Image (cartoon, rainbow, N blue to C red):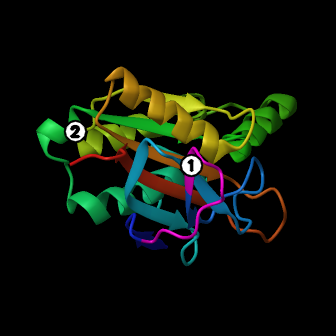
Amino acid sequence: MTAATGADAGAGSGAPARTGVLAGVRDAGRIGAPGRLEIPAGVEILARAEWPGVGEPPPLARFVVSSFSPLVAEAARLCLSDHFGQPPAPAETGDRTAVVLVSAAGDIVSGREVADLVDSGGNVSPLLFFQSVPNAVLGHVATRWGLTGPVVCVSPAGDPTADALDLVDLMFAAGDADLALVVLAEQATVPGAPDRAVALLVQPGGHP
């Protein structure tokens, strides 16, 4: 797992409205491929964290079977810890911090588990119903860190990073938040490939 600040900026992509800065995420289903994040001019990165680390992400109480929610929670924890230290965030900051989850495929493993249990006539754990809603893990993150701004989950139609940061840019422009935690997460669909997640803490560009 790595964490870095916005100082890890690279060369731009040449597009006038964006500044290319970070490697690590590509489009839907290929989050682990090398690439460059294109950051809207109105957004500035304060902290960044990535998974995979060594082994599996730490287990998360009340989330079972699947690595998806622990993956999101661990990437978020490392990113927020890099900026704030220990939870919670300062109240005046947490009150104005949005949380955004972006995933093209969502929790694949939980979905398969439920389908298999239904097909076989087995009993489906209530926890699987609970965690099948992506907002569940965002609620865990938001509660632990005291983040009470907007909570949004999206499945991108195009490039997941561009869609997420454009959404955050709109939140900032509308005055809905002063900071945003953005987590992009995908479970591996190829045997032996790692799950991947990138978490970014961002603020409006040009912030004093």
Give the left or right position of residue 53, taking residue 89 as reference.
right
Residue type marked 2 = Gly
Q: Position of residue 11 (x, y in %)?
A: 58, 69
Residue type marked 1 = Arg
Quarter of the image where one finds residue 5: bottom left
Could you say which is closer to the camera, residue 5 or residue 95? 5
* Residue 176 in the image: above or below residue 50: above
Which residue shows up at 69% across the image and 35% down it? Answer: 156
Could you say which is closer to the camera, residue 5 or residue 207? 207
Label 2 CA crowd tier, 10 Å (few <14, some 14–19, many 20+): many
Give the left or right position of residue 2, taking residue 128 as reference.
left
Which residue shows up at 40% across the image and 63% down it? Answer: 6
Secondary structure found at label 1: strand
Q: Mark 1 points at which residue?
A: 18
- Mark 1, mark 2: which one is toward the viewer? 1
Magenta residues span: 8-19
Q: Position of residue 113 (x, y in %)?
A: 74, 41
Give the left or right position of residue 146, taking residue 138 as reference.
left
